Amino acid sequence: MAKILISGGTGLVGTSLGKQFVVEGHQVITLSRTTTKESTTSFWDIENKIIDVDLVNSCEVIIHLAGANISNTRWTKARKKVIINSRVQGASLLYNAIRDQTNVKYFISASAVGYYGAVTTAHVYEENDKPYNDFLSKVCQLWEAAADQFQAKNIKVIKLRTGVVLSDKGGAFKKFEAIANNYLAAPLASGKQFVPWIHIDDLVRMYIYVLNHNLSGSYNAVAPQHVSNKDLMIHITQKLNKPMWPISVPKVVLRLGLGEMAKMLTEGSKVSCHKIKKTGFKFNYENIDQALKDLT
């Protein structure tokens, strides 16, 4: 049994991951920005650098999922700073809490396929591809660099570059579902941009897998099947038995409504999961039909 500390443990992924670790017999402590008397949570404050140092050093595994939502508000200069700092300063606060004598052996950090940039090309991105030069890529590069510093303390570092997480508990799928149920489903922009995705159950299994198999480095956490925005909306509307508009939402409309953030929706590339599969990991949901059948 391992003692596992999870930042961002109350989010969509953290909640599912924490529950599964408990099922497997591990002790899970969640870092929370809210003071609580629960023995399974511990207060931390990134901005004011408050954290329980003894707790951090008593854990064998730290999983860093904390980070401000990138899609719930426009990317103003101030918002961009919050998005970056919540990830980077959170990792640094954890790093600075590590003593020379510590039980921590693994630091597993979330990252995102945004590392490769929001760009639509025919190229299939793999882990050794160079990062892009847009905001999303900058966020991921700084995020991963903050994780890599743990190597200096002989802690094994794993980074999972995650695609769009599909879950019936919230996140992107519930938004897609609401749009379809309100008869507003339509491709976005060209509809040809790819949407790297992963079923939440496979993502949770992947976090557990990289830990149990003593892996390190970067891995793309995406399903094997490449799906375009248009095809994704077709599959969703068919599963829900709802119509889809034959015309796309113009890119200019999305840009006017969302600003720079619209690029997340109007651009997207193919991302490969070959590296993690090569280690022996098997997906339960390899294609979008399998995933949607479970979620709808």
Image (tube, rainbow, N blue to C red):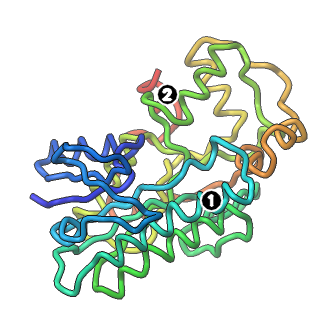
From the image, state whether disc 2 or disc 1 is nearer to you.
1
Q: Is residue 236 above or below residue 12?
A: above
Find residue 55 and report its horizontal and vertical position in percent. 19, 65
Q: Is 34 placed left or right of 119 in the picture?
A: left
Given contact means CB atoms under 8 Å apart, are the residues at marks 2 and 1 in contact?
Answer: no
Along the line of sight, the residue nearer the viewer: 176 or 286: 176
Q: Residue at x 76, y 26 (%)?
A: 186
Q: Amino acid at mark 1?
A: Gly
- As helix, strand or loop, the secondary structure at mark 1 comes to helix
The alpha-carbon separation of the residues under discs 2 and 1 comes to 23 Å
Find residue 23 and report its horizontal and vertical position in percent. 16, 42
Mark 2 / mark 1, whichever is N-terminal: 1
Along the line of sight, the residue nearer the viewer: 5 or 212: 5
How crowded is the residue under tag 2: few (<14 C-alpha within 10 Å), some, or many (20+)?
many
Find residue 50 and report its horizontal and vertical position in percent. 35, 65
Along the line of sight, the residue nearer the viewer: 55 or 149: 55
Q: Residue at x 76, y 31 (%)?
A: 187
Checking the image for residue 114, the label placed there is 1
Checking the image for residue 292, the label placed there is 2
Q: Amino acid at mark 2?
A: Leu
Q: How many marks?
A: 2
Quarter of the image for the N terminus: give it. Answer: bottom left
Quarter residue 153 falls in: bottom left
Q: Residue at x 52, y 36 (%)?
A: 171
Find residue 25 and report its horizontal and vertical position in percent. 11, 49
